[in-house]
Image: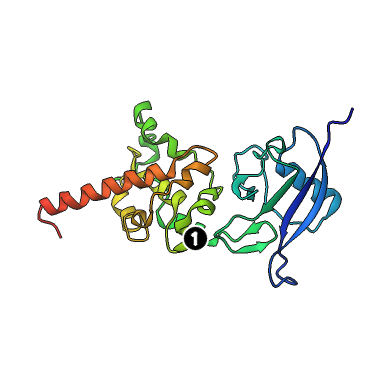
Amino acid sequence: MSTKRTITFEVMRYRPESDAEPSYQTYSVPCEQEWVVLDALLYIKDNLDTTLSFRWSCHMAVCGSCGMIVNGEPMLSCKAFLRDYPDVIRVEPLTNFPIERDLVIVMDDFITKLASIKPYIIPKEERKVEQGEYLQTPVQLKKFKQYTLCINCLLCYAACPQYGLVPEFVGPAALALAHRYNLDSRDNGRSQRQEIAASHDGVWECSFVGACSEVCPKHVDPAGAIQQTKIASTMDYFLGFLQGGS
């Protein structure tokens, strides 16, 4: 007995060479019970419409490539099991980003902001190879490990209303990664990152809606990281005030 279920997919299409505005195209897909939305899109690509464009890579919720809006919610399409959805599923590109083609977004703004917070260890003193590695205890690792789990899927940016309203906002993933390096015992670059992270377009632009943490597939909690950075920045301010700084 067949376990297949026919699901109607309403997929947003945008071809810049011919379309003035995005539109929706409908596909009827015979879906296996264990499929996810990504499987259905691959079926469409292979069997119904080879012109459909979307990003994907690992199919294991590791690479972060297949982020999309599924029935109004930012999701990794490789984690969106069809058994959890009705017989009509709408698939759209991530919101708050320009559309490059169909379900593919332009990521340039995010990449620029990610680079701006210096997402790498800035040691106090460079070590020579013969001096060995930078050592760290399990307790020191635990302090920031949660924030290392980000896969740059951009679901948090699609869910963030503030990023949609204020494109200059550095955004949740980049700020969470800045927090990750600031908490790393091997790092000495917090003062450099603060120029971006503690600016008006950094953590102070966040209105703490918390949607970023709700949609995060890896439970990084970028909203929590931003609030912790706000507290640390406030302490910096008052400490400088008490010490007679400007």
Front one among 82 and 56:
82
The image position of residue 54, as x and y in percent, is: 70, 53
- State whether residue 123 appears in this view: no
Q: Locate the N terminus and report the quarter of the image it occupies.
A: top right
Q: Residues within 10 Å of mark 1 (few under 14, many from 20)?
A: some
Hey, which residue is sitting farthest right in the picture? 1
List x then y, in percent, for residue 40. 76, 44
Vertical order, 120 against 246 (above or below): above
Left/right placement of residue 109 relative to residue 223 reads right
Residue 151 visible to an observer of this rendering? yes
Pick the front one: 13 or 100: 13
Marks counted in the figure total 1
Quadrant location of the C terminus in the rendered image: bottom left
Q: Position of residue 20 (x, y in %)?
A: 70, 73
Residue bearing the label numbered 1: 164
Secondary structure, mark 1, is helix
Q: Position of residue 46 (x, y in %)?
A: 83, 49
Residue ID at (58%, 57%) = 95
- Give the colour scheme of this rendering: rainbow
Q: Quadrant of residue 140?
A: top left
User: Which amino acid lies under the numbered mark 1 shown in the image of this protein?
Assistant: Gly
Asked whether, in this view, residue 7 is left or right of residue 200, the answer is: right
Nearest the eye: 103 or 142: 103
Residue 180, image quadrant: top left
Residue at 13%, 54% (x, y): give it.
241
- Going 51% across and 49% down the picture, which residue do you hit? 156
Q: Is 99 on the left or on the right of 19, as rendered?
A: left
In the image, residue 117 sits, relative to residue 221, either above or below, namely: below
Q: In this orientation, which residue lies closer to the viewer: 190 or 124?
A: 190
